[in-house]
Amino acid sequence: MSTPLRTRAARVVAAAAAASLLLPAAVAVAGPRPGPATEHHHGGTHLTVTLAGRATLSADYLADGPPSGAAASPGNGRQGPWDGQVIPGFSAMVDNHDGTFWAQPDNGFGAKGNSADFLLRNYLVRPQWDTNRRGSGSGEIEVLDFIEYNDRDHVLDFDIVNEDTADRLLTGADFDIESLVRAADGTFWVGEEFGPFLLHFAADGTLLEAPYAFPDGKSPGNPYLEPGETPNVGSSRGFEAMAGVGRYLYPVVEGALANDTDPRRRWIYQFDTRKGEYTGKRWAYQTDQTANVIGDAFATGRDSMLLIERDDFEGDQSVTKRVYEIDLGTKDRDGFVRKELVVDALRIDNPRGIDAGEGYGLGETFALPVQSFETVLFVDQDTLLIGNDNNYPGNDARVTGTPDDTEMALVDLKRKRVADDGVTVVGHRGASGYRPEHTLAAYETAINQCADYIEPDVVSTKDGVLVARHENEISGTTDVAAHAEFAGRRTTKTIDGTRITGWFTEDFTLAELRTLRAKERLPQVRPQNTAFDGLYLVPTLDEVLDLARNSRTCDGAPVGVYPETKHPTYFDSVGLSLEEPLVAELRRNGFDRRDAPVIVQSFEVGNLKELDELTDVPLGQLVSSSGAPYDLVAAGDPRTYADLVTRQGLREIARYADGIGAEKNVLIPRKADGTLAEPTSVIRDAHRAGLEVHTWTFRRENQFLPAEFRSSADPNGIGDLVGEIRVFLDAGLDGFFSDNPDLGAAAVR
């Protein structure tokens, strides 16, 4: 385990300050670094993230200068040209340590063709922090001054928009500037995306040297791209992020390189500012999912930095808006740099109610759900600054139809004491009451709603990759029926004795499955979830495990994973055994140990016994209120689920499993009138056998609730789920699955 960031950064920065070309990084504090978790809940302290202040610049603010945006795409009721220079958010910032910041927008409107009238600048700003306390500031960002990037010394050897003018001011058609590091001599190093290039500017904005070319390829906008040459860097996927410490810059490629076989790999490079060349060193970073990009970087030591990882969604569609700490000196077993969550920008406590009620993500919990979360830096050892590029005028994450303002937010990192509540809340297929099930969006929502575990149902693709789907038949959970190219894959199969017609994961390679998008399985019950149809990929088990191990629960514990093997007897019959690849994925992700926050569950008996021989992780026997495990049926074994929960049956389960996951009626049945009866003896008997008892599934809609907890006769109306859960907790339940983890967590509290 590496040295904690607070200690390491303080030591490294102090040593580097005297000889550093670049300004030293602020001292930071990392996210929690727990050791192996023997219990998911835990006492002690953990890092909390709290909104301390916020300031905004109106999206419609215009700085002095010529009109801009003549070719910009209109949006949210705004259309250029505008009578001045638009400030489309800030893609990078430098702290002046006097309450002001240098804040740099990007190329303007997103492309060369629409940004020729946008002048590349670096603005001097002063946020008047709204802290919602006495003496609070106005909450506005003051624009004090700016420098204009220019090539008045004729350094460039290619034509620019203002080629024949005296000042040769640079525009968004010349460079797409994204990242910023200030050197000790006051000059600025800028990472950009059209090359991608590293640019070196004087303190007044004058280009000092020819652009430094990226050694591993060019982007489509590179002025030196040869006819027929294939770009290796995606459009707008260059140096969005760059950190600096000592004599070195660390530019980060925003997206995957075209020739990379791993679409989740992002490369971090080292550039020597003294020698003016790349050193040949680079480090691999793995994103949580394929489409994620790197938004910013901030050095916290010679071998450590903060990285923003984000997706391209905004508002309630957002999944990943995170700040990770990485350690260049430590790699995981797959060769990627270690990453540790510092801030999930979709879950920041807002106890003072700063700007609460003014838009999406502004409430008791503050979120920065903007598409382009692109600024992070430490302003002191306990306080982060985060901010956004608002892509004016198109983004409207806060208020639909209104362009997003430019935001700067202060985030305090403090330690808080927590207690063990003793109950495990499992996000059933994620937070499937709020997002389409078995998507990373559903899992992330569950984590943010204080679930302790997330539950992926596991099935296999044709090429043996484990993915998360409720069933291997996917017509109800993906848009496969709308893909004409797969019409011929529709077929009828017998799964666990039942004939089913549709499309099946085992008939698709992972690459083919990745062309599909998830959709809501119960649109009549949850019509609000259909707004997310068509957005999200089918995740692999590896991605779910990565999300969990890179996340923390609301009480600071590692997020647990509760995979269910679906139809293991069937998958064995088609040569796609689930057990071995499941254990391999757990092992590869560091989860194959007794104290890992993992519980593997199954409705069958034989595969749990097999898993008991293959892995040390806890196992859970699922039990329905009717029927029998299919592997027992297939083998002619007469035992039913009812037999499994007798005293003798529970003692037998304890020989290969650690707990049971029982359908609710097994524990507390319902009377003829639909109300709850008295609890059975199953919880007591299971505890006597040494087994944990979890139950499924708690849902908030009336049709799933006991009669006494329904709000009306409307089957899809919202009833009193918290009340139902508390009855089960009073009966001695250890944990439960819920489509609504927020209500589950509330019931536990």
Image (cartoon, grey):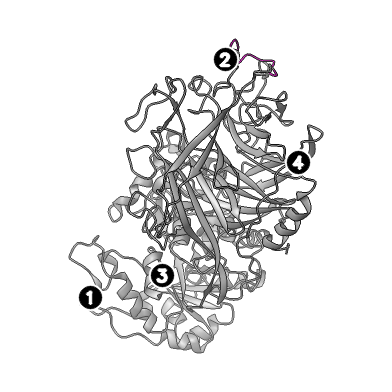
CA gap between label 2 and label 3 equals 59 Å
* 10 Å crowding of disc 3: few (<14), some (14-19), many (20+): many
> Which of the two labelled residues, at mark 2 and mark 3, occupies the earlier sequence position?
2
Question: Badge 1: few (under 14), some or many (20 or more) residues near its Cα, within 10 Å?
Answer: some
Q: Is residue 520 left or right of residue 572?
A: left
Name the chief secondary structure element in magenta. loop
Q: Earlier in the sequence, mark 1 or mark 4?
A: 4
- The reply to whether residue 732 is in sight is yes
Nearest to the eye among marks 2 and 1: give it.
Answer: 2
User: Which amino acid lies under the numbered mark 1 shown in the image of this protein?
Assistant: Glu
Q: Is residue 490 in view? A: no
Secondary structure beneath dot 2 equals: loop
Going from N to C along the chain, the mark reached first, 2 or 4, is 4
**What type is the residue that disc 3 sits on?**
Ala
Residue located 45% across and 58% down the image: 495
Residue 473 spot, x, y in % from top left: 44, 51
339 sits left or right of 661 in the view: right
Which mark is first along the chain, 1 or 2? Answer: 2
* Label 3 – label 1 distance at C-alpha: 21 Å
User: Dot 3 lies on which element?
Assistant: helix
Q: Which residue carries the number 4 mark?
A: 21
Residue placed furthest toward the left:
713
Q: Residues within 10 Å of mark 4 (few under 14, many from 20)?
A: many
Q: Quadrant of residue 339?
A: bottom right
Whole-number angstrom distance, CA of label 4 to CA of label 3: 50 Å
User: Which label belongs to residue 162?
Assistant: 2
